[in-house]
Amino acid sequence: MNGFLLVNKPPGITSFNVVKKIREITKIDKVGHMGTLDPRACGLIIIGLGKYVRLEEYILNFTKTYIVEIHFGISSDTYDREAYSFKYQNIKNQDISPQKIEEILKSLLGEIEQEPPIYSALHINGKRAYELAREGKNLKLPKRKVKIFKAELLDYKKSKFPIALIEFKVSAGTYIRSLVKDIGEKLGCYAITSFLLRTEIGHISISDSISFNKLSKHWKENLVSPVKILNFPLIKVDALEEKRILNGNNVLLPTYENKEIFVSVVNSKDNFIAVGKIKGNVLKPEKVFSIE
């Protein structure tokens, strides 16, 4: 069986735990997540089943939307609550206010350079960064360019350790924990991610997901087609064109204004058969899937 599951991951388990659970209940060997979530984070995660795991490269590039809770005056080497030790700071005299936070959020919009946290899943010489960090290695990860499309303050609460609730929409590969740390530095104080919820992946909303604890009984009726997941323009082909595509050959189609775009290709029975790239009037298949 092939398809996708949109899962609402609870905090306290890894993305691989979700994959393992789905393998157990579906008895399908090929299962993979389309973008990880930190163990303490919760929210939307896309799981591919069967042959559609091969579509990961397209889904990983989708934008992500998060709601993050920030505690000011607290720091850790992981930038969140997963750390073994914390630092605390008296920030009564610091200039923290909703207005100041909103000014900083505006300054983050657009393309920025970001340094990933050392406790991340990035590969360095064949090892995960977090593994090297736990070994006490002194890491300096290269900065990367990311885009911040939205940064909105939803709520702010004064306390000994002030709390802010912020919604971010960001490009793939953006670390919210690093953004939170940067916000604190711009304010002149510590800042830590205390809660993180992923609400959207591209056009897909958490409202369309199934709770993790309901997977065992309801996974079959919650399978989603690749056409809905990819959300590419749809091309329907006839039997002759289908045969050419399944053999990996290009086909001629009506012009698309010479724009180079990805499309989902279905046959005359609306079965998904390929992801293609179309330019002008030529459709080149990139990922081809035989019909069972």
Image (cartoon, rainbow, N blue to C red):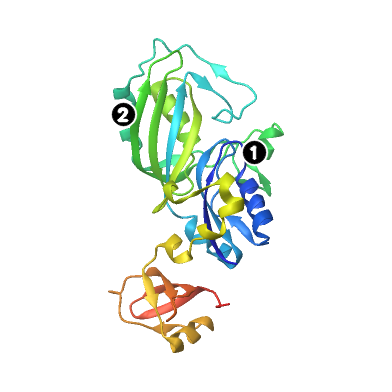
Given residues 169 and 136, the one toward you in this image is 169
Give the Cα distance between marks 2 and 1. Answer: 32 Å
Where's the C terminus, which quadrant? Answer: bottom right
* In the displayed structure image, the side of residue 146 where residue 30 appears, left or right: right
Q: Residue furthest bottom?
A: 240
Tell me: residue 59, above or below residue 83. Answer: below
SS for tag 2? helix
Whichever of callouts 2 and 1 sits on the residue coming sooner in the sequence is 2
Q: Residue at x 68, y 49 (%)?
A: 126
Q: Quadrant of residue 159?
A: top left
SS for tag 1? helix
Given residues 45 and 191, the one toward you in this image is 45
Where's the N terminus, which quadrant? Answer: bottom right
Q: Position of residue 91 (x, y in %)?
A: 43, 13
| Amino acid under disc 2 | Glu
Mark 2 Cα-neighbour bin, 10 Å: few <14, some 14–19, many ≥20: some
Q: Position of residue 164 (x, y in %)?
A: 40, 26
Q: Residue at x 41, y 85 (%)?
A: 238
Q: Residue furthest front?
A: 217
Q: Residue at x 65, y 46 (%)?
A: 17
Q: Which residue is mark 1?
A: 130
Q: Which residue is mark 2?
A: 102
Q: Position of residue 117 (x, y in %)?
A: 55, 36
Do tag 2 and tag 1 residues touch (Cβ < 8 Å)?
no
